[in-house]
Image (cartoon, rainbow, N blue to C red):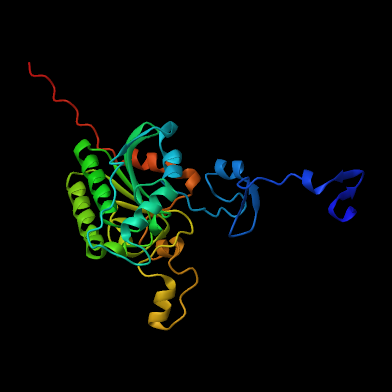
């Protein structure tokens, strides 16, 4: 029965001996359709070799990109959400938290760490979209607030990497309170003269955009990131008009003055270290000794 054998140029391979390509070896760009192997995709820091589309990555990848030799001290790693409102949708909130923790290996939607980039100290808070859509709950707000306190106490610049669908509905008012809490902590950081850089990645929306994501001394973004408060569909339905081309893209937001610059992920570490060097306070020379 030759129909299930390959017979060409002397090659005869029975079906049971055919070798399938293992999953995860190839990456197909959702923007231009270019296919590349995952090793090359990782080497390009998860960007497309042809069109430079920036694939979404999580805190583990950002820490690897930024921190020297991927060495860092994680802060408040074990904080986990409670259930202050006894919220139930399709399942009780504690069950949703537990199942998401098992599926992702994360405790919540943000990780915070202290390490060095090109030899310069930096505190980083990075959000993970795969944890309930990167939603901002009480743990997210608390971990960011503690990271800011750590940066202020040790006078280390602070980098916030935002990637979020907005506030977490399962915590209602507790979630919205995190906007005020993190903003107040950033005001204290500014009073102390410690630099704060906000990196907005795809997507940054909702209460995160309305609070700490837009409060940086420098607000920067990756190319093509969706940035806004409400999503484009909601805005279009509300105003009843078609939106401009590229509405709420990083490039659109930059053109309208809400970003300082857009940085390619492959240049992110170097540009951040250059910026941190520029923001470093000058050392005050010692007073000359009196005769």
Q: Quadrant of the N terminus?
A: bottom right
Q: Residue furthest bottom?
A: 240
Query: Taking 39 as reference, is 248 left or right?
Result: left
Query: Taking 189 as reference, is 234 left or right?
Result: right
Report x, y in % for residue 260: 37, 55
Is residue 68 positioned above or below 180 on the image?
A: above
Q: Residue furthest right?
A: 10
State the residue in front, 186 or 284.
Answer: 186
Q: Quadrant of residue 44?
A: top right
Report x, y in % for residue 18: 77, 45
Can the viewer see residue 150? yes
Q: Residue furthest left?
A: 291
Q: Residue at coordinates 27% horizontally, 60% vertically from top-left?
A: 211
Report x, y in % for residue 13: 84, 45
Q: Quadrant of residue 65?
A: top left
Is residue 82 positioned above or below 206 on the image?
A: above
State the residue in front, 133 or 19.
Answer: 19
Q: Residue at coordinates 80% horizontally, 49% vertically from top-left?
A: 15
Query: Taking 247 as reference, is 286 left or right?
Result: left
Query: Taking 144 as reference, is 116 left or right?
Result: right
Q: Residue at coordinates 61% horizontally, 49% vertically from top-left?
A: 49
Report x, y in % for residue 98: 36, 52
Q: Residue at coordinates 24% horizontally, 45% vertically from top-left?
A: 148
Q: Quadrant of the C terminus?
A: top left
């Amino acid at each position: 029965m030759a129909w299930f054998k390959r017979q060409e140029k002397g090659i005869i391979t029975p079906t049971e001996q055919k070798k399938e390509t293992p999953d995860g070896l190839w990456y197909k760009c959702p923007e231009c359709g270019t296919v590349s192997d995952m090793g090359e995709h990782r080497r390009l820091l998860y960007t497309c070799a042809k069109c430079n589309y920036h694939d979404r990555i999580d805190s583990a990848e950002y820490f690897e990109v930024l921190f020297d030799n991927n060495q860092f001290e994680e802060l408040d790693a074990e904080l986990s959400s409670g259930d202050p409102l006894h919220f139930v949708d399709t399942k009780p909130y504690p069950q949703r938290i537990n199942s998401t923790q098992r599926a992702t290996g994360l405790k919540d939607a943000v990780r915070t760490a202290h390490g060095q980039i090109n030899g310069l100290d930096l505190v980083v808070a990075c959000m993970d979209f795969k944890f309930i859509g990167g939603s901002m709950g009480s743990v997210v707000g608390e971990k960011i607030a503690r990271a800011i306190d750590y940066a202020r106490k040790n006078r280390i610049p602070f980098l916030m990497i935002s990637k979020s669908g907005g506030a977490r509905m399962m915590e209602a008012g507790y979630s919205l309170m995190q906007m005020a809490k993190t903003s107040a902590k950033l005001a204290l950081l500014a009073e102390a003269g410690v630099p704060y850089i906000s990196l907005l990645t795809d997507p940054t929306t909702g209460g995160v955009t309305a609070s700490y994501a837009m409060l940086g001394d420098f607000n920067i973004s990756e190319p093509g990131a969706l940035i806004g408060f409400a999503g484009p569909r909601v805005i279009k339905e509300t105003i009843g008009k078609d939106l401009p081309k590229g509405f709420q893209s990083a490039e659109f937001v930059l053109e309208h003055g809400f970003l300082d610059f857009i940085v390619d992920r492959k240049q992110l570490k170097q540009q951040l270290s250059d910026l941190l060097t520029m923001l470093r306070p000058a050392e005050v020379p010692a007073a000359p000794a009196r005769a």
